[in-house]
């Protein structure tokens, strides 16, 4: 999965700053290092080796199903006759000519069903029913369209499809699919077998409390300081290993990180929720396989899922304490996290146990990241097909949102939506009882690796320009502002920025954390960037010269790292790089790129 090319919530004028190749994109979902430390409940399991879980996805073309060929032939004839042209334009008129139909598919097994349509299409309603061997047909179940999505520009694909439906083990069965005839030629029935795993029998019974003998790799573990900072106790969170995640299914380049956690989006999975307690791990595995293999997402879309019995499960990999960018709310995935209730709450309410666990995990995450459950936050929509607001629109949201607040969807269901105010009140109650939330500066210090990455504090937190806040540590500094977010700057990049005047300089506040690169590092700021390598030192790159350098590939292009700050030359400005120079002419804004020294 590629990294986002711009941080949301920093204002439309700043979005273009980070648009660049993959290394730049790492800044845009700011790469926060995972922090080793004491293992605690809810520690990240994103680096666990693939588990021996069987599983499969069968994609069965509906046009090849029983009766489908005859249905299409008759529809094409009818459409051709209606137009006076039996050959031309028939497919485009199928819907008008033939309406809906039902086809039957022989299925050899599986536990999850969904339907995928042609890319870019706008399919009509679709429903499925099942007849197991020796039994009668079950009732029709309407399938909801997928209304979650990755943000544009993330590199995650997104198929046009329905949400997955948990059926339980089908064995040899027949599946009836009811859909528009116009959708039939390119439609596929997805049959997912989530596989068997030895841990299924015990995983749903209780949360695994990770310990030093749990086998988790050290770099994937939660920093103890992050837990100690949270005023709210961490709830029992079952790890990805607990539900048997096959880590080989997710994208190999790892998760993307935002600059902060500023809000949550609450969902339902839109599945009827007929699963038993013992089946919960299989349901999550099926959803994970559907999201990755069928939809083309980098990982499970949600950051957390909560079952109807109150179990909280780690969703997308990357660390439950960190600002992992999900695919749960198209246009608003950055700086938010997604919690999805496993079930369909259109006409019935989530269980009390489910709602309480949703409140507990939100309150803990808010306490850790300094988010006020009664507050608001302003985001810039990344747009996309499911987003309620066009790309570039500034939107002020409550910190606890239903999916329908940001997307064109009924999620989390009509009845589920009526529980949102009670959920907000419960989260606030839990946070208040725990003593409130950490400051954004302290929360960032902890979530970024604490003393291991930034060192110990050297002074109390203090005010910064224009309503910002900051704190210095022995290795780095954390600066926070309502517009630019909360980011850390460290080492020689911090020293260079400090020498210019910190946030009071022409560079202003940081827009990213320090991002490590092969052979160097960088921070983006409001007014420019500082790039550092051991050979070239820390240099400032600005404006049109930086834009041209970005176009040429940043430090990975033939110019390499900057060797000087941007500086005055007769008639303009210039920056030198290890492989040449870029000169800007004041008279007409012309840029000249020269190779060599």
Image (cartoon, rainbow, N blue to C red):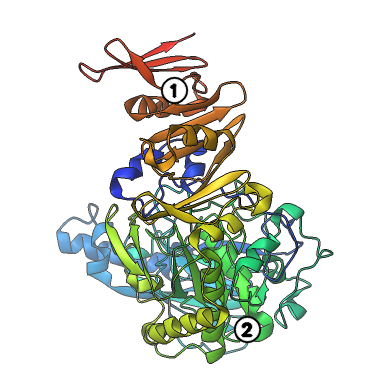
Residue drawn at (33%, 29%), measured in percent from left and top? Answer: 543
User: Which x, y percent locates residue 488?
Assistant: 53, 47
Q: Nearer the viewer, mark 1 or mark 2?
A: 1
Residue identified by numbered label 2 = 133
Count of marks, rendered view? 2
Q: Residues within 10 Å of mark 1 (few under 14, many from 20)?
A: some
Residue placed most toward the observer, 137 or 47: 47
Q: Residue at x 51, y 75 (%)?
A: 436
Name the spot of residue 314 as percent of width and height, x first. Answer: 62, 68
Mark 1 vs 2, N-terminal side: 2
Q: Which mark is residue 565?
A: 1
- Near mark 2 (Cα within 10 A), the count class, few <14, some 14-19 or many ≥20, is few
Compared to residue 11, the image places residue 597 above or below, namely above
Q: Left or right of 365: which side holds 410? A: left
Q: Position of residue 587 (x, y in %)?
A: 20, 16
- 390 lies above or below 412: above
Regarding mark 1 in the picture, which secondary structure is present there?
loop
Horizontal side of 236 relative to 23 (left or right) equals right
Q: Which one is nearer the viewer's eye here, 114 or 13?
A: 13
Residue 391: where, in percent of width, then height? 29, 53
In front of the other: 273 or 528: 528
The circle drawn on residue 497 is none
Answer with the quarter of the image where residue 444 lies. bottom right
Q: Quadrant of residue 94?
A: bottom left
Q: CA distance from mark 1 to mark 2?
A: 74 Å
The reply to whether residue 44 is in sight is no
Residue shown at the point (70%, 80%) measured from the top left = 204
Left or right of 9: which side holds 108?
right
């Amino acid at each position: 999965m590629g990294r986002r090319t711009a941080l949301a919530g920093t204002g439309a004028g700043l979005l273009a700053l980070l648009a660049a190749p993959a290394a730049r994109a790492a800044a845009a979902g700011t790469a926060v290092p995972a922090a080793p430390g004491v293992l605690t409940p809810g520690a990240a399991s994103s680096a666990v080796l693939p588990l021996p879980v069987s599983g499969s996805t069968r994609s069965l073309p509906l046009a090849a199903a029983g009766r489908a060929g005859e249905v299409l032939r008759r529809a094409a004839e009818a459409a051709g006759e209606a137009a006076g042209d039996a050959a031309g334009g028939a497919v485009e008129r199928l819907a008008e000519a033939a309406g809906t139909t039902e086809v039957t598919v022989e299925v050899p097994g599986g536990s999850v069903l969904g339907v995928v349509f042609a890319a870019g299409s706008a399919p009509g309603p679709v429903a499925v029913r099942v007849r197991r061997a020796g039994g009668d047909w079950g009732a029709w179940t309407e399938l909801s369209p997928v209304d979650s999505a990755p943000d544009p520009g993330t590199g995650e694909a997104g198929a046009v499809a329905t949400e997955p439906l948990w059926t339980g083990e089908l064995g040899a069965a027949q599946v009836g699919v009811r859909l528009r005839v116009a959708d039939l030629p390119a439609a596929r029935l997805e049959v997912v077998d989530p596989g068997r795993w030895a841990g299924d029998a015990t995983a749903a019974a209780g949360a695994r409390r990770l310990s030093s003998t749990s086998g988790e790799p050290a770099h994937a573990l939660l920093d103890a300081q992050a837990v100690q900072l949270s005023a709210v106790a961490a709830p029992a969170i079952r790890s990805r290993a607990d539900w048997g995640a096959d880590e080989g299914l997710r994208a190999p380049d790892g998760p993307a990180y935002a600059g902060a956690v500023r809000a949550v989006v609450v969902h339902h999975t839109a599945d009827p929720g007929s699963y038993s307690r013992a089946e919960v791990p299989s349901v999550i595995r099926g959803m994970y396989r559907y999201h990755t293999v069928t939809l083309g997402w980098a990982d499970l879309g949600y950051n957390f899922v909560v079952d109807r019995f109150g179990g909280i499960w780690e969703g997308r990999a990357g660390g439950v304490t960190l600002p992992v960018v999900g695919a749960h709310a198209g246009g608003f995935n950055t700086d938010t996290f997604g919690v999805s209730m496993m079930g369909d709450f259109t006409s019935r309410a989530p269980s009390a146990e489910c709602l309480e666990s949703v409140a507990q995990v939100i309150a803990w995450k808010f306490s850790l990241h300094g988010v006020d459950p009664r507050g608001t936050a302003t985001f810039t929509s990344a747009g996309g097909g499911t987003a309620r607001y066009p790309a570039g629109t500034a939107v002020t949201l409550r910190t606890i949102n239903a999916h329908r607040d940001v997307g064109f969807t009924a999620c989390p269901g009509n009845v589920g939506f009526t529980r949102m105010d009670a959920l907000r009140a419960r989260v606030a109650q839990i946070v208040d009882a725990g003593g409130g939330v950490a400051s954004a500066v302290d929360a960032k210090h902890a979530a970024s690796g604490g003393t291991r990455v930034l060192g110990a504090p050297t002074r109390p937190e203090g005010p910064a320009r224009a309503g910002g806040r900051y704190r210095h540590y022995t290795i780095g500094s954390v600066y926070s502002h309502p517009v630019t977010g909360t980011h850390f700057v460290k080492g020689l990049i911090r020293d260079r920025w400090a020498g210019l005047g910190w946030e009071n300089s022409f560079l202003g506040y940081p827009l990213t954390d320090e991002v490590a690169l092969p052979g160097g590092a960088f921070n983006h700021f409001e007014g420019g960037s500082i790039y550092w390598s051991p050979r070239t030192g820390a240099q400032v790159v600005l404006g049109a010269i930086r834009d041209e350098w970005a176009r040429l590939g940043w430090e990975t292009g033939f110019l390499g790292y900057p060797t000087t700050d941007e500086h005055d030359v007769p008639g303009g400005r210039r920056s030198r790089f290890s492989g040449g120079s870029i000169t800007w002419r004041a008279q007409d804004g012309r840029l000249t790129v020269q190779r060599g020294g």
